Amino acid sequence: MPKPASYWDKFTQSRISRRRALQMAAVGGASAGAIWIVGCGGDDDDENGQATPSGNGNGEVITGGTFRGSVSLVLGKDPHKASTFLTHALASQAYSRLLRFKTTTGELRQDEWYTTENELASQVETPDDTTYIFTIRPEAKFQNLPPVNGREVTGEDVVYSFNRYSEISPNKANLSMVDSVTADGKTVTFKLKEPFGLFRNRIASFQDLWIMPREFVEQSETASEDSMLGSGPFIFERFEPNVVMSWRKNPDYWETDDQGNQLPYLDGVQLDIITDQNQVLSQFAAGALDSIFVPPQLLNNVRSQNPNAIIDGAMRNVLSFLYFEPASYTAGKPPFNDERVRQGMSMIINRDALLSRISDEGGGWPNLINAGFGESWWLNPKGDDIGDAGKYYQYNLDEARALFEAAGVGDGFNTPMHYSSTVYTTIVPYYDIVRQSLPALLEEANISVEQRGEEYGVYISKTFGRGEFEGFTFGLESVFSDIAAYWTNMFYPRDAGGGRNHSSVSDATLNDRIAAMLRIQDLEELREANFDLQRYVSEKMYYVPVVTPVEFSARQPRLKNVQNTTGPTTYATGTEGYLRLMKEA
Amino acid sequence: MRTYILKRLLLAVPTLIGVSIIVFFMLRILPGDIVQQVAGENQVTPELRAQIERQLGLDRPAWQEYFEWLGNVVTLDFGTSLRDSSSINERLKNTLPTTLEMSLLALVISLIIALPVGIVSAIRQDSVADYAGRSVAIGFLAIPSFWLGTMIIVYSSEWFGWATPLPTEYKQIWEDPVANLKYLIFPFGYFIPLGPAVLLGVSLSGTVMRLTRTQMLEVLRQDYVRTAWAKGLRERRVITAHALKNALIPVVTVIGLQLPILVGGSVIVESIYTVPGMGQWLFTAILQRDYTAVQAIALLAAIAVVTANLIVDVAYAYLDPRIRYG
Amino acid sequence: MATTIDLPAIDQVLREPRPSGPTAWPRIVWDFCRRKPLGGIGLVIIVVMLFCALFVDGILFGSREPLLAPYHYNDQTFGDENLGMSLDHPLGTDQLGRDIFSRILYGARISVILGISIVAIAAFVSLAMGTATGYFSGWFDTITQRFVDIILAIPPLILLIYSLSVFAGTSGPYGRMFWIILIVGIVLAVQSIRVIRGAAISTANNPYVDAARTLGATNARIVFRHILPNVVPVAIVLSTVQVGTAILAEAAVSFLGLGIPEPFPSWGTMLNLTGASQFRAFPIQAVWPGVAIALAVYGFNMFGDALRDVIDPRLRGSR
């Protein structure tokens, strides 16, 4: 299937490159080849998309240095217990999975996003489409601290982890297709109840099967929350609430680069816990922090204050969307029970205006599947391939009004709008701008909004978690490990895998089609089925996706060999981000 | 004297118990399920709920928990955080001295600024100096501390590229006094006193200025002062000295009255300057429904206030014989 | 703060004979401004603020259309974000394309409503409780004093943050406003109650109260005819200054994100901590709300101070 020329293509090929070229010119063109790793150089080197071996273009390996980053919140340390991506991002420093997602220095081609690669497992065999046999590499060892003392990782560890995960993880529905897991020395066999095409992705997912050693976890009730001990590249060092969290290099880490150098290159990772955006920016300007997220409205400000910094833009995988109160679906409560009203809600949102309000750099339109997923899986609502369903995303005031009229609410209506008033503001800077702009947009059709801000804890438990709200909510969905997880989590019944079915959507036809799609083994076919589903839900607008702006991160030039972690890997920063990172003194 | 102290102590006890009850039970009526919060964004199954409740000790009746908590508190065991099971005592060891120190510094700074201005204002009542002093005083208390702090942080970063130090760089005063004072008073460099303690002190000084002025005026109106005044210049100087001494007695109460405001103000200042103290901790704990931490901090804050008032009352009684024997 | 007062009735407050006739009040005010220029400035600020609060839109005439303000407070114009000062937008626009000058004016209304409501509750409660406990004494007094102690022991901002996140976490702006008014009102009441009580006690100790009682006056009559008239002026002075405190308290919680939510333009909300990074790029946007708050509090305090100087003869001055 030929890849359609899309908005996204234009974006990756020309816009970023041009900007980077300007960056390079600012830094000093001659040394560009040496200094500049990500981007231009990469495209030419990697014909087959293999990860570039170590080095900064000169093949030079720089070891040492501690990466200094920041987080705004640390919620927990045990990845089995947590469902928040905050914890999972931390998990990847100290823990490993059987598989991980592919990264590279240089541009990672879109059709390679979400491809899995080996981590603890050295190979995966699939004798039939419901059996997966993972062989754990012989050199895989736990960190050399009591009680594991550097012993080898075995199949039993995987079994133990899987059982624990299935018992206590809030995400356990993600691996519910597994019928049994058995170990035999260094191999572990997963038998599935039914074929599941994206199983490797589930295993590689940073939200799910982390391998944790039994003797560490079972030391006490709180062992896995007090500390972290696994087979990962960094050893947990300390945590001070509201202050700092840090790891040091694992000297016995089993992975080496292509030239035989031991990984990781860094001596350690330190994350300062900073909630104040101002301080993050000041510390970056002062050179204390190595890399930060840049709020879109401050892009120019950061550029001018940090002329040497390297600024990257990408669309993250956090989905911004509206969801409607469950009673609309379960009890046919107006007005959102009517498909036309939901469609109108979508068509009254001027997505392009929102994007330009957020920053000058634009972004994409999600259609439930986030634009950040890349066009391999995401059907661009602005493209040709989406067909008729694309019209529901276009800003069309007249059509929206006509739809409202047809649904009997032509004179407008009053509705509560829930949102989270804390946490999102610092972690996802554009959330507030969009949330504040929505009422103004809705007013055009006489829809008056009663804003109901809820503090994050209340929002997460009540509105997001239990669907106890009225009217609609503007919220965020954190990333899923693969496309299938969107469909099952957001549409299946809550007690049957629909962990994120906030609105209690119950469309039996849709669920049947989802189940059918999950059984497809051939990736291409799966992709097409997934596109079909996207067309279908575009019309239904059970959830109204809003925007995926380009979000920016800035980093100091002394960071080398930066891995391109667009796509799903942004969150497993330990193994997929810091593992091959180098920091110049 | 002793009976006076004893009486005040006895009065303090029911106050503290009352505070502990309010602090403890108000949290139990929270909307927002702590269980769901601990579990995160996904669904809470009945098994998960039971397990988390057991871990958090929520499966017993509230009154039982209250007495158990109270018992622990009396032995200085404040329990573990509901958020991340870390020891509250541990964290208190780091944060309590920080906030205490910052508050004391702020108090001292506010007195340094406010006392002279208040006294001059009173002695030269209705003069230009008085008007100026009163305007400044009201100006200081009218300017919101959070606004001033935000302005300082934003402009210092934009104009001078200064950054406030990170919480990791905070050293307790016994570890590294220079670094400590730098963090709290001169974070942007020596001789630039724009630190959190200074902000807090300045925001307090307005009220202290006015209170000092009022107390001073009251003393100056006393008959004995008026008489001395009428008698002549030389005596006036002597009487001013006497008046000052007597006026400083109520200033002690002024200090006592500032405590609650100091504790509240530290929440704001610590958030703006990212000082790893109790104020910021309390704020995040409240937002995160960390029951045990909020209880501990709120109770400690109240204890601090009550204790300070007690000390102030006793000091007042000691200095003013009329109270002692009246 | 005055702690004990021995007061004649308010008629005797002014040294000159009280003006009478139709121009009485304007002359009193003019007199006041002349003798207490700072108080006069405060009065002007207060009047301007009230004027803005009343006429920012046409609500007095039944219309929601902006009147004094050139734009509605949530009038967003896509494409006009973060503009500088201009004739069209005297104070520029914010990140959503809203006119800042208009928002400041609407904010005056929020501050006035909250300030006055809070102080009304505080005055009512402290007058009632203060007079009752001061006059009647006994176990009622002791119990009340214990409650007062308890509430005074909890730092007010902490109590406010606490209560707002407990009770008002999910309510809309009106719910939040209600709780802010209630809690801050109670805290301020509790702070005033001691003073009122002191005034009531000292008045109750006056011989003429005894005389009245001997002549057969009921408690109610004594309270209303003798105690209250002496206690009310104290309350008035306290209240005026407390409006400033109330405005600051609301601004502080809104700043922390627990007070009046968006899009209502409370001055404190406009300075919200989470938007602080916005101020890096456009620092001037943080200046206006802060200045507004400072001016408002300044005005009420100045005026209250001057009022107290006038009403309490002992502190009147050396002239």
Image: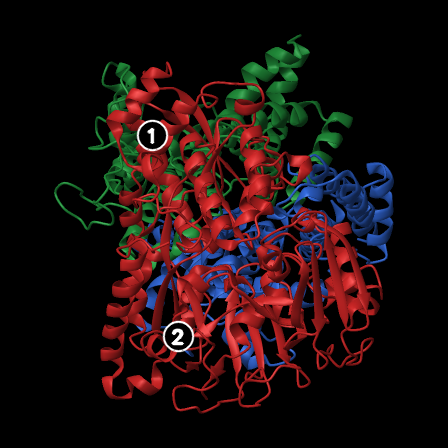
Chain colours: A red, B blue, C green
Circle 2: residue type: Gly
Mark 1 crowdedness (10 Å alpha carbons): few <14, some 14-19, many ≥20? many
Q: Earlier in the sequence, mark 1 or mark 2?
A: 2
* A99 left or right of A352 in image: right
**Does the CB distance between marks 1 and 2 fall below 8 Å?**
no
Q: Chain of mark 1?
A: A
Q: Chain of mark 2?
A: A
Secondary structure under tag 2 reads loop
Task: Pinpoint residue A266: horizontal percent, then vertical percent.
Answer: 55, 83
Task: Pinpoint residue A111: horizontal percent, then vertical percent.
Answer: 42, 61
Q: Mark 1 and mark 2: span between their CA atoms?
A: 42 Å
User: Is residue B236 in sight in this rendering?
Assistant: no
Task: Pinpoint residue A3: horizontal percent, then vertical percent.
Answer: 34, 56
Task: Pinpoint residue C214: horizontal percent, then vertical percent.
Answer: 68, 12
Above or below A289: residue C80? above
- Spot the residue most to the front: A127
- The numbered dot on residue A106 is 2
Above or below C8: residue A570? below
Quick one: A20 or C170, which is closer to the camera? A20
Above or below C118: residue B301? below
Quick one: A508 or B31, which is closer to the camera? A508
Mark 2 crowdedness (10 Å alpha carbons): few <14, some 14-19, many ≥20? many
Quick one: B229 or A65, which is closer to the camera? A65
Where is mark 1, residue-wise?
Answer: A442
Picture quadrant where residue A560 is located = bottom left
* A44 left or right of A141 in image: left
